[in-house]
Amino acid sequence: MKTIRNKTADVQADKNGFFGAYGGAYVPDALKKELDKVYEEYLRLKKDPAFRAELSLLQRTYQGRPTPLYYCKKLSEEVGGADIYLKREDLNHTGAHKINHCIGEVLLAKHMGKDTVIGETGAGQHGLALATACALLGLKCRIFMGEVDVKKQYINVRKMRLLGAEVVCVQRGGKTLKDAVDAAFEDYLATYDHALYCIGSVVGPHPYPTMVRDFQSVVGKEAHAQFKRLKGSLPDAVVACVGGGSNAMGIFAGFLKDASVRLYGVEPMGRGENIGDNAASITFGKPAVLHGFKSLVLEDEKGEPAEAYSIASGLDYPSVGPEHAYLRDIGRVNYVTVTDAEALDAFRRLSVAEGIIPALESSHAVAYAFKLAKELGRGKSIVVNLSGRGDKDVDFVLDKYPEMAQMQQ
Ligand SMILES: *Cc1c(COP(=O)(O)O)cnc(C)c1O
């Protein structure tokens, strides 16, 4: 279980897909064989100039890459302290970073000769991005979604269906994301001869954490080059929210080798520290296997995976990508927490100060940047990964907190 570091000090999983003590592929043998094939094909395509050119063209002409790096002058002055920059992943087509790995994964499926893509979704954001990539590239798309989420996120179900995807309503267990993942894996086990499962974050069995990170790393590469061009140096800190951990791994990947850049992963503390009130898997989790990989998992009193909670539904997963657990262990990334209330405050302040409505998920990263800006002080700089836009959250926030619309600065 040795983890190899290449010469740039980027972290690479060992040949069994372990990052230190975390990762691996805890799946039936037949699926393990198929996943090995997927990884082999991925490694081949990763080096293929034609595949890279195809992906890069779609990123530029369809997705809207490169996304801007924006200096929040007003907000930085208001907060008082370090300068705050935003990597504008909210400006991607479909409004969040998830399209980065969805186009990559669906392109991989197409090159492998698959005609169908399978996915799971909780809040609907991954399902929507995957359905979009499938419409673009002409593959069939089947999305598993718990019944509770189908009811809660009905507009996303309608959008997925409009895009031509089949949405399967999952009736088992708690009828949420965890059950949707189980159902999607079962479907994959029966259909892998012509289908590829495209997972929604840097989670799941090897090689998903590696592939999804690589497809997301475009965020960090761009941010690194953009900041350097703008300021002639590197930022002092990079901040991102952590659900499964894909947007965070994407931006961190660009800075891991720069020892001077402090990295912060922000977990949702929700309503508080009790199990069931948050989704801070790194902060409170214990090593365990869930959904085919070993990582830190939130457990209830019986040792079962706990229900995770956050005001941001894209963050309420009871585990986290294995590479994050490893980066915590070696001390390269600091993992911190932000409550629902702090995220809501950041949601409002960024909207008012800069005219940018952030996703509630991304608002967690913004909220932590406020604290860090004061701590680091003037002359320092922070880059925040603004993983998505908040249009999807406006009704929910204003229905629940009507006073927010009338608040003055
Ligand atoms: C899904 C989502 C997240 C959380 O997923 P990660 O894999 O942790 O990045 C964060 N922000 C937005 C906008 C999302 O849609």
Image (tube, helix red, strand yellow):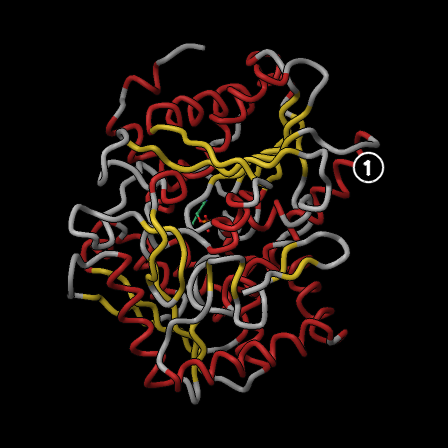
Q: Which sits in the foreground, 20 or 188?
A: 20
Q: Which sits in the foreground, 366 or 286?
A: 286
Q: Is residue 88 left or right of residue 222?
A: left
Give the secondary structure at mark 1. Answer: helix
The answer to whether mark 1 is within 8 Å of ligand 1 is: no
Identify the residue shown where x is 34% and y is 66%.
161
Q: Is residue 58 above or below residue 270?
A: below
Q: Which residue is mark 1?
A: 229
Classify residue 187 by image quadrant.
Answer: bottom left
Q: Residues within 10 Å of mark 1 (few under 14, many from 20)?
A: few
Identify the residue shown where x is 66% and y is 32%.
70
Identify the residue shown where x is 36% and y is 85%.
191
Identify the residue shown where x is 27% and y is 22%.
402
Q: Is residue 89 left or right of residue 345?
A: right
Q: Position of residue 387 (x, y in %)?
A: 52, 43
Q: Position of residue 401 (x, y in %)?
A: 27, 23
Which amino acid, mark 1? Answer: Arg
Q: Please state, as top left, top right, bottom left or bottom right, where the N terminus lies in the image.
A: bottom right
Q: Is residue 390 left or right of residue 179?
A: right
Q: Position of residue 58 (x, y in %)?
A: 65, 64
| Residue 270 visible to the viewer | yes
Q: Position of residue 354 (x, y in %)?
A: 56, 23
Q: Please state, as top left, top right, bottom left or bottom right, where the C terminus lies in the image.
A: top left
Classify residue 359 by image quadrant.
Answer: top left
| Residue 390 visible to the viewer | no
